[in-house]
Amino acid sequence: MERRNNLFTINSPTGEEIKIPLTVDSDSDIYSSLKTPEDIQNYYHENGYVVIRNLIPSELCDVARKFFATEIKPYQKYLYRQATANPEKHVLTSHGYMLNSLLNIQDINTKKFPNFKQTGLSILTHENIQKVVSMILGEPGTIIQTMYFEGNPATWAHQDTYYLDSTELGKMTAVWVAVEDIQPGAGRFYVYPGSHKIDMANNGGDFDIAFNHTKYKELVIDIIKKYQLKCHAPALKKGDAFFWNSKTIHGSLETSQPEYSRSSFTAHFIPSSTEHLQYQKRVRKFNLKQINAMNVDHPKDLDNIKNQLFFSLETQFPKQIQYLKRLAIKAIVK
């Protein structure tokens, strides 16, 4: 690990050392030069991603982190988590950061977490984000999934389309919003530019997510090496937003600075004229609600008594229900 000329050395997902920027250099930052909608669209469609600086007000980012600290962090019971989609209690790093990120902010119980839920959704449905999403998709977007990160789970290299997408594959876009300055060794978001143009294996057969997930992870690394793709991990400051295509290979780098958090929100958007396709096989039914004039799906709304009852069963019989879920997924992607 070295710090020289505003560069930080860290390992990429393929194990090679790469140099990433320590901070945003305003004199050379290519994203700051994207001034017009055409600039943003062209960069996104050519590279499979784009970074928009200062998209979310700094004050709103601070409020979201405050309510996470006062409402979510002290909570000792179960919440749905991004990596497993299962209810889990907090898993904390040695520095006290929540490692198992939250899944679907829109579904958490409003009475228990009113301020965090409202503020988080205010960020993800912010008018500035809606404008960029519409610019990228060519029409308004529908949110089908959201997340919140504090610690870094070091996400493997993957394409979102393998897990979720629009019924028109490759049309989904996503955003990662930094609500604090993200240090280079705290789990910087990375992307492989141009990877959205490469066709990879579909979910199913030897690459099913239920029982052969490892094969898919290995395939992604093989593709990166075969096409000699280059890993980019731009410096992100509080309020910056990173948009990427559902076919773009991306993830989060390893943690080499565990003393820092990487507080951030994520949302996935599909064109409003399309539907949500899960595992490239199944069309999911919507449970849409409008938030700030934007459609947001609520797949497991915990304000609903039926969902509360199933959530209770998931916490009481986790192994049995998780196995049944895997069997159900296997049946979908076979």
Image: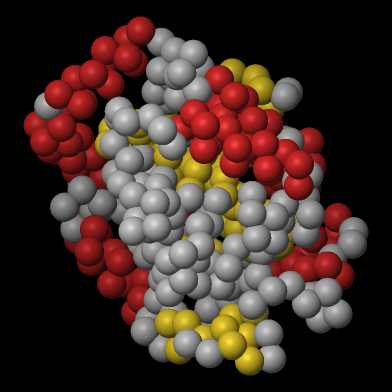
Q: Position of residue 113 (x, y in %)?
A: 50, 23
Q: Position of residue 176 (x, y in %)?
A: 59, 52
User: Which quadrant of the view contains residue 285?
Assistant: top left
Q: Residue at x 86, y 55 (%)?
A: 37
Q: Residue at x 52, y 38 (%)?
A: 69
Instruction: Specify whether residue 295 is in view.
Output: no
The answer to which of 109 and 288 lies nearer the viewer is: 109
Q: Position of residue 102 (x, y in %)?
A: 42, 39
User: Which quadrant of the view contains residue 14?
Assistant: bottom left
Q: Would residue 18 appear left or right of 255 to someone viewing this image? A: right
Q: Specify the farthest residue to the left.
A: 320
User: Which quadrant of the view contains residue 242?
Assistant: bottom right
Disc count in the image? 0
Q: Would residue 124 appear left or right of 217 to someone viewing this image? A: right
Q: Specify the farthest residue to the right.
A: 36
Q: Is residue 253 above or below residue 228?
A: above
Q: Specify the farthest residue to the top.
A: 305
The answer to which of 217 and 24 lies nearer the viewer is: 24
Q: Residue at x 53, y 78 (%)?
A: 231
Q: Position of residue 136 (x, y in %)?
A: 72, 51
Q: Is residue 10 above or below residue 299?
A: below
Q: Residue at x 63, y 92 (%)?
A: 4
Instruction: Specify whether residue 119 is in view.
Output: yes
Q: Is residue 229 above or below residue 80?
A: below
**According to the image, what is the colour scheme of the structure?**
secondary structure
Q: Would residue 214 appear left or right of 170 to someone viewing this image? A: left
